Amino acid sequence: MAKELIRLENCRKEFDGEVVLDSINLTIKDKEFLTLLGPSGCGKTTTLRIIGGFLKTDSGKVLFDGVTINDVPPHKRKINTVFQKYALFTHLNVFENIAFGLRIQRPRLSEQEITQRVHEALELVALKGYEKRTVSQLSGGQQQRVAIARAVINKPQVLLLDEPLGALDLKLRKDMQRELKQIQKQVGITFIYVTHDQEEALTMSDTVVVMNKGEIQQIGTPLDIYNEPKNAFVADFIGESNIIDGVMVSDNTVKMYGRNFQCLDKGFAPNEPVDVVVRPEDIDIVPVSQGQITGTVTEVTFKGMQYDIIVDFQGFKWLIQTTDHSPVGAKIGVKIDPDGFHIMKKSEYSGLYGDYSSYSAEYDELSADPEGGGQEDE
Amino acid sequence: MSKPAASLRSEKGIVDSWTTVKEFFEHFRKQSFAYPYVLWMALFVVIPIILVAVYALTNADGKFTFDNFSGMIDYVPVFGRSLWLAFLATVVSLLIGYPVALAISRMSPKTQRILIMLIMLPMWINFLLRTYAWMSILENTGLINRFFASIGVFDWINSLHAADANYTPITHFQLINTNGAVVLGMVYNYLPFMILPIQSVIVKIDPFVIEAAEDLGADSATVFRKVIFPLSLSGVISGITMVFVPAVSTFVISKLLSNGTVMLLGDLIEMQFTGAAYNPHLGSAISLIMMVIVIICMSVMNRFGEGEEQAVMM
């Protein structure tokens, strides 16, 4: 895992005068599962296409194994891609689709070797016995598997995956997530994965790169990203967050709602204004008398595993996830442990996220797939 | 429990029959839009074909006979020439048309629209007029020969043979009244029918499929050979059909550009109906054979495109 494989240095890209990527710096290690995560138009697909060789940077360098590859065309890179809408060859059957990369190799491979390797690839994606099928006879999930088999057959060092599960339904997507991770371990190569689904990113990745507006917001392990978001954008994009204005009174003490709270964060200037993140699951509901602060329940949504309740604290609405039912209109107190707070420096995103005044139950579903997995970044 | 279930069933039965009746009328209503066309086809396609068959199988007295077909042996060279020239015209059209279609499909949508319009533009001018124009270009005293004369090509050629006593000086190249002129006329007139279907198919190829091929290691020549060309095959077959069929049956082009020296099937058939050789029975028999040949050619062509969307038959 230690060796560096790909490095982007100050990569910048404009389309028609609009900045899509603004000096991206990124190092990708060998055999790593790295996810580029962000909303539509954040530049994640553009980054992937630059690595694949389908786009050229306006400025900056792309290095592969220490060698600059800015001008190397896609067919000469040891990188293969699983495309968003599979992009299978409709004039070829499953076997020939997968064999494509082998058949065009020079010197020619023997028919025996091709057959053997295609069968290995089919086994890898659990599609044995589908050799003779035409592409149109396959379901979306099966087409996806063919696309993966076709991309790994050349034994690339890096596999790029552009929202490969975007077109699948939820159940299948979950299964494929697990399977993709399995495949990555089995073939032992670097995966660079693009998605706008934060849950997918957290589940599969070794490293998550959160992007917005053509800039990298944060790079880290899924745990880091979730527990230590760098700014309000990351906190809001990864999971649910209540983000409240606060003041860092001193190390380990943050003040909000005119009250001091114990926290674990330090290293801020005395009385520095900060964004305070409280995850909905880190909040305990207690009787009013025992509450650190008190508020009124304004909305309750049953979510199966838990209730999502919206609580009004002096005009600012919080989302709390709890297994205890509280009726609408009830006065409740809440208690937050010191490790439930995460303090962030103020950023350009401060005040934009983290208020649940306009919360609706459909919010998750809507934000999970903003435009039906369609094209973006172009 | 069983009784309400039964009544429910019968109620459902009524609902079912209602929807069936409604569906029937709906169906009828939708189908009825096709009736004018069906009638048109019956009147002007099916009945004429039957008439042609009847004529082909009878003689002037109205008696049943195969004589019309047995007399056909004399015309084998005409059949051969027609098929050969139509084949040449199709090949030339494909060789010119495919690169053009490929080039056009790589331009921006706006440029594509303009270029397609330019390709269609000549078709807005009368077919005869366009072919007459070629006559004045190819004639012995036409534009090309006059151009060559003006730059002294013939004088130069003649001067090379000055020593030869038997040599007759030339004053022009024989362009018109040749097989070449007829093929040229066919290509000129039918080329758009080759370009348009191919271009429309290439344009629809998913650019990501081409990227996928590049991604897997294919250089641009391989991408073309293994992806673009196979995926455009249905357009190629349509194009071949749309050039070959009119080319094999044309009579105007050969008449104007060969002045009767290159006789094609179309000319032969025309002569049987309007010329001095008036014999509609023989003409019908030739037409029938030609139809069969075209159908055979097209079904062979369509085999190549199997699995792809079927090309137009005629």
Image (spheres, rainbow, N blue to C red):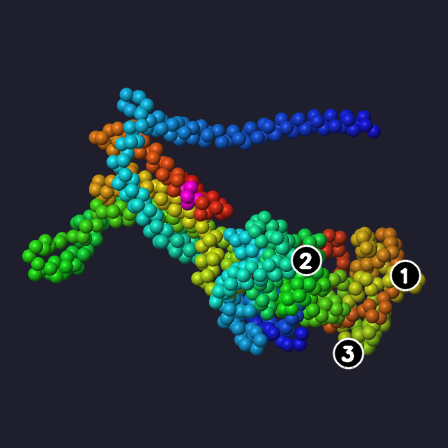
Front residue of this view, candidates A39 and B146: B146
- The amino acid type found where label 3 is placed reads Gly
Q: Is residue B243 magenta?
A: no
Place residue B125 in its image quadrant. Answer: top left
- Picture coordinates of residue A27 (x, y %)? 63, 74
Magenta stretch in the rendered image: B298-302
* Numbered mark located on residue B125 in the image: none
User: Tag 2 or tag 3, which sits nearer the N-term?
Assistant: 2
In the image, are marks 1 and 3 on the same chain?
Answer: yes
Q: Chain of mark 1?
A: A
- Mark 1 vs 3: CB contact within 8 A: no
Magenta region, main secondary structure: helix
Residues at marks 2 and 1, CA–CA distance in whole angstroms: 41 Å
Q: Which residue is mark 1?
A: A286
Q: Earlier in the sequence, mark 1 or mark 3?
A: 3
Of labels 2 and 1, earlier in sequence is 2
For residue A277, side relative to residue A68 (left or right): right
Magenta residue check for B301: yes
The correct choice, above or below, for A236 with respect to A92 in the image is below
Above or below, A152 against B123 in this view is below
- Secondary structure at badge 1 equals strand
Which residue carries the number 3 mark?
A267
Query: At which x and y percent is residue A42?
Result: 62, 64
Where residue B215 appears, as percent x and y from the top left, is 53, 63
Percent position of residue A249, x then y: 82, 75
Question: Can residue A81 be seen in the rendering of this structure?
Answer: no
Who is closer to the viewer here, B268 or A285?
B268
Q: Which residue is mark 2?
A: A176
Quarter the C terminus of chain A occupies: bottom right
Q: Residue furthest right?
A: A289
Q: Chain of mark 3?
A: A
> Residue flagged by tag 1: what amino acid is it?
Val
